[in-house]
Amino acid sequence: MGDSLQFKLYPHHVGIFVSDIDRSIKWYEEMLGFKLMFKNSFPLPGTGPTVMAWVKHGDFYIELYDSPQKAPFSTENYGGTLGTKHICFYVEDKDFEPLKAFLKSKNVNFTVEHRWPKELVVKPEGCGVIYIADPDGIPIEIQEEFRAGEY
């Protein structure tokens, strides 16, 4: 925490527009262990009534917005645009391989499967990372526990 800040920020949620909210809720529940906490219609500025759902895992929420009129996510210009590019979660190192095995058993496609070497991340054993995609192609990174700059 910076010297000038008298408060601590905590992560709360990320918002994602999806093409089929029920399909996305089911996917986040079955693949990543989230639980549906709330679902209702809200009048969004410039959009009108939109169904929104909050799914939760631990202390973190994903706010899903049903938005079938939006163009699907594309990685073609991933680095050429501003804005959120992916969500990242981590698991304890001991849980990384079992999680990968679980996702593979569910036929989840890994768009990236990589191990960053210790020379780059300065973590003695390096850091494993995978990327998967939700039903709308939104990239989700899952990595072994990593605390940048703390080794």
Image (cartoon, grey):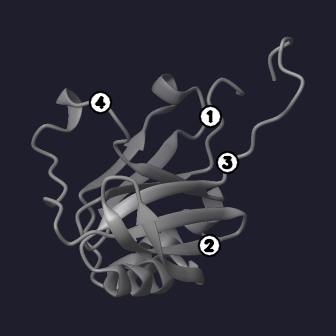
Q: Are marks 4 and 3 in contact (CB under 8 Å)?
A: no
Real-space Cα separation, disc 4 to disc 3, in angstroms? 21 Å
Residue at screen point 36% across, 87% down: 22
Q: Amino acid at mark 4?
A: Leu
Residue at screen point 29% across, 30% down: 82
Q: Secondary structure at mark 3?
A: loop
Q: Secondary structure at mark 1?
A: loop
Indicate left or right for 65 with 14 as reference. left
**Among numbered discs 2 and 3, the one appearing first in the sequence:** 3
Q: Are marks 2 and 1 in contact (CB under 8 Å)?
A: no
Q: Residues within 10 Å of mark 1 (few under 14, many from 20)?
A: few
Decide: is 149 above or below 21. Answer: above
Real-space Cα separation, disc 2 to disc 3, in angstroms? 12 Å
Residue 40 location (% of width, % of height): 51, 81
Tag 2 residue: 56
Q: Amino acid at mark 2?
A: Lys
Residue at screen point 53% across, 82% down: 39
How many discs appear?
4
Q: Secondary structure at mark 4?
A: loop
Tag 1 residue: 124
Q: Is residue 13 or residue 40 the one in the foreground?
A: 40
> In the displayed image of the protein, which residue is found farthest to the left?
76
Tag 3 residue: 11
Tag 4 residue: 82
Q: Amino acid at mark 3?
A: Pro
